[in-house]
Image (cartoon, rainbow, N blue to C red):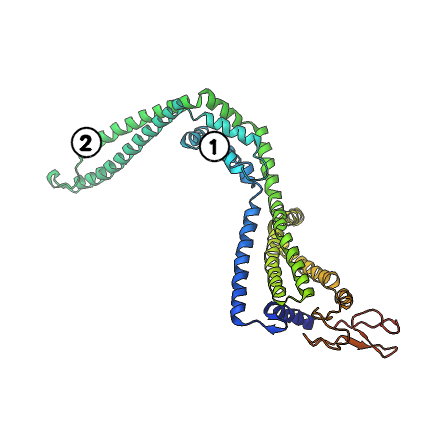
Amino acid sequence: MFRKIRNIINLFFNKSRNINNEPVNKVSLIVIIIIDLFILINVFSGLDSISRWYLSPYQAYPCYTSWQNYQQNNNQDRDFLIVSEALNNNVNLPSSYQESSQGHLGEISSICVNFTSLKEQINQPNNKLIFTSIEDKQKQITSLQEKNKNIRSQYDSTLLEKIAGQPNNLSINQVEAQKARLELDKNNLNISNLQGEIKDLKQQLLTTPETVKFISFLNSDTNFNEVKKGYDQASFWYPSIQIIFQLIFLLPLIFISLFVHKFAIEKGYDLLTLMSWHLLVIFFIPLLIKIFEFLQIGVIFKSLLDIITIIFGGLVFLINYLYIFIIPAIGFAIIKFFQQIVFNPKNQASKRVEKSRCLSCGKKIYHDHLHCPHCGYSQYVECHNCHNLTYKLMPYCSHCGITQNINIS
C-alpha cells in the first residue's frame, strides 16, 4: 500500500517537472510556476464571481433582517425606530434593489419589494419635517442633561466646601448651592416639556396614513412568516447552488485540459504534455477545496446536523466523528474509481498497442523495440505456454492466444 502511494507521488512529481523524462531547467520551471500561480488566481477569481451569480438569501430577501429585528424588538418605541430608518435613508431602495439584481439569477421577494415600497412612501417632506423637529428637541434634551451633569458635580463640591467652612470668595466653583438647585429644577422642567413635545410629535408621525399602512403591513404575521420561510429555504439551498455553478465553471476547464493532455501524449508534444498536466492539477485543487467546503456548509452537512441534533440532542460534535470516517471512505472510493476505470493500465495498454506506443509513457515506438527508447520500459513478457514474447498487460498471448497472467506492476 505504502509502495503504491510512494509510486503515485513519484509519478506525480515526475510528470510535473520532467519533459521527455528529463528534468526541466530551473528558468523554465520558474516560468511554469509563475504561469500556474497566475492561472490559479484567475480560477479562484472566476469561482468567486460565478458563486455570486445567483442572488444570495440576503439579496433575494432584503427586508428580512430589518423585519426580524422589528418582530423581536420589545421596545415600546419600535414603531418609531423603524419609521426613523426610512426617514434617515436618502437612497431610493426599490431602484437600488433592482440594480443589485441586474446581471444575477433569481428574483427578489415580491413581499420585500412591497415592504420597501411602503417604507419608501414614509419618506415625505412633512414627515421629514416632524422627524427633524424630534431630532432637534432630542439634541436640546441632551444639551440640558449635560448641563445638569456639570451643575451636579459643582453642586456636590460646593456642599463639601460649605461643610468644611470654606469662604465663598475662596470657592473654586462658579455656582452656589442654592443657585445650582434652581438651575437644575429649571432644566428638568424644560427637559420634561421637551419630552412631552417629542411624544406628541412621535404620535403625529405614527398616525400619518403612509406610516399607519406600513406599520399595519409589518404586523402581518402571514407576510413575515412567508418571508422567513423563503429566507430559510434560500439559506439552506444557497451553498448547493453555489457549488453547482462553480462546477459548471471548473468542469469544462478540467475536461479541456484532460483532452489536451491525452492529445499531447499521443502526438508526442512534450512541452504541451507538461503544461496541460499542470493545468489539470491547478483545476483540481480548487475543485477539491470547493467540494470540502460544500461538505462543511452544504445540504449534506445541514441534513446530517439535523439528524444528529434529533437523535443525540446537543452532541453536535458527533458530526465531526462522522466526517472523519466518511471523508476517507469517499476519498478511497474516488481513488479506486480512477484506478479501475479512468486510468486503468489494462485499458491504456490496449489502446497503446493499437497505436504502436509505449505501454508506460505512451510515446511512439516501433514493434521490434523490446524496450521503450524514451523511458526504458520493457514492452514484452514471455508467454507461460508457448514461451514466445508477447505484450505486457494484454489479456491473451499474440502467438498462441492463451490467457496471460497480467502483472500490472
Indicate left or right for 387 with 365 as reference.
right
Q: Secondary structure at mark 1?
A: helix
Residue 107's x, y, as percent?
58, 35
Kindly identify the residue that appears in the image at 75 percent across and 73 percent down: 366
Kindly identify the residue that appears in the image at 38 percent across and 23 percent down: 201
**Amino acid under label 2?**
Lys
Q: Earlier in the sequence, mark 2 or mark 1?
A: 1
Q: Quadrant of residue 361?
A: bottom right
Residue 266's x, y, as percent?
69, 65
Residue 110's x, y, as percent?
57, 30
Q: Quadrant of residue 390?
A: bottom right
**Amino acid under label 1?**
Leu
Nearer to us in this view, 151 or 249: 249
Nearer to us in this view, 362 or 41: 362
Query: Which residue is label 1 attached to?
Result: 93
Question: Is the residue 100 above or below the residue 42 in the image?
Answer: above
Nearer to us in this view, 368 or 26: 368
Kindly identify the residue that appears in the image at 17 percent across and 41 percent down: 161
Question: Is the residue 125 above or below the residue 21 in the image?
Answer: above
Task: Look at the image and tell me in which quarter the C terminus lies.
Answer: bottom right
Q: Residues within 10 Å of mark 2 (few under 14, many from 20)?
A: few
Query: Which residue is label 2 attached to?
Result: 179
Q: Secondary structure at mark 2?
A: helix
Question: Is the residue 213 above or below the residue 145 in the image?
Answer: above
